[in-house]
Image: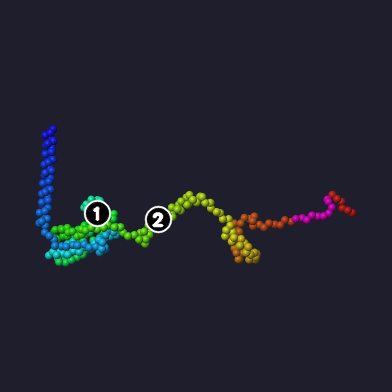
Amino acid sequence: MVSFKLLTLAVLFLQALGAFAAKAKAAEDDASTSSQTPLLDVSISASFPQSEIFGTKLVNGHPTRAVLSIANKEPGPVTIVMAGGSLWTLPDSIYGPNQNLRNLSNTQYNLEVPAGSAESLTYSFATEMQPQDLRLSLVAVVKKEDSFYTLQVFNETVSVVEGETSLFDPQIIFLYLMLLSLFCGTLYFIYSTWLSTLFPQKRYTGGKGGERARTSSKGSKKVDPSEQVSVVGADGPAVASKSTAYDENWIPVEHLKRPEAKRVKSGKTGTPKGAKKAE
């Protein structure tokens, strides 16, 4: 049992020793390769036209524009394939030192720069992060003949800030209108559902209509029978005058008939029926 444990420990030790030797060899190969890689005589720098005196600021929600200035000092032409960037934490950051927080968008150019000439490109990106100080790293991929090279363009500290808000901002105005309409709709719903039953509605029996009807009835003129015109419609005959026309079909018949005056017989003065006439 003890020999089996010792054998296991020996195998693990040999594996660790082999892995360490492989890493050392890979580091030596990388160093030799980098020493044999020819240097590229191309300089690329980045500038921010919208930057302030106190440093470069990345405003959330607004695109940040960087101008890449390329100077080709090679005897032959080179091609700017693409450009990209990333945001890293500072050594005293709460997220830990040198942590990659955000990879920025990559922009392809495929722009050929002749020998001994200079060109400029625009690289734009946007951020939506918590306000803080970060390290902005911008790189460019350059192609010379059949080889690709990665050149550092910018590697400095920048500040991520929030954009300034204004009362006349269209987004703020639209937000206020939406909140106001929602508030008014809620109040109307509450009133029509619960509060309207607590306030009884008044019924208007007269009002302007009644006063107008009384006024018109006082100033109405009698219609001359000679000016009346009979109108025959689908509902029956109707009487209309030349000055005013109206349909009497909707009026009940008993209201159209004028009441007749009852004749009252006058009492006779004389002798009663059983009395004899005086001779």
Write the start and end of the magenta stretch as one range.
Answer: 264-273
Q: Quadrant of residue 215?
A: bottom right
User: Which amino acid, mark 2?
Assistant: Leu
Residue 194 in picture, x, y percent from top left: 48, 49
Residue 77 in picture, x, y percent from top left: 15, 64
| Image quarter of the C terminus | bottom right
User: Which amino acid, mark 1?
Assistant: Arg
Residue 256: assigned label: none
Identify which residue is drawn at 63% across, 66% down.
227
Read off the residue under disc 1.
102
Q: Secondary structure at mark 2?
A: helix
Q: Among all residues in the image, which is located at the extreme bottom?
A: 117
Which sits in the foreground, 157 or 9? 157
| Image quarter of the N terminus | top left
Residue density around tag 1, few if under 14, some if 14–19, many if 20 or more, within 10 Å: some
Residue density around tag 2, few if under 14, some if 14–19, many if 20 or more, within 10 Å: few
Disc 2 and disc 1: Cα gap in Å? 34 Å
Identify which residue is drawn at 51% across, 50% down.
198
Q: How many marks?
A: 2
Q: Is residue 270 left or right of residue 2?
A: right
Prevailing secondary structure of the magenta residues:
loop
Identify which residue is drawn at 74% across, 56% down.
263
Q: Quadrant of residue 43?
A: bottom left
Q: Among all residues in the image, which is located at the extreme right?
A: 279
Which sits in the foreground, 234 or 10? 10
Mark 2 vs mark 1: which is more N-terminal? 1
Residue 179: assigned label: 2
Q: Is residue 261 left or right of residue 269?
A: left
Residue 66 in picture, x, y percent from top left: 24, 62
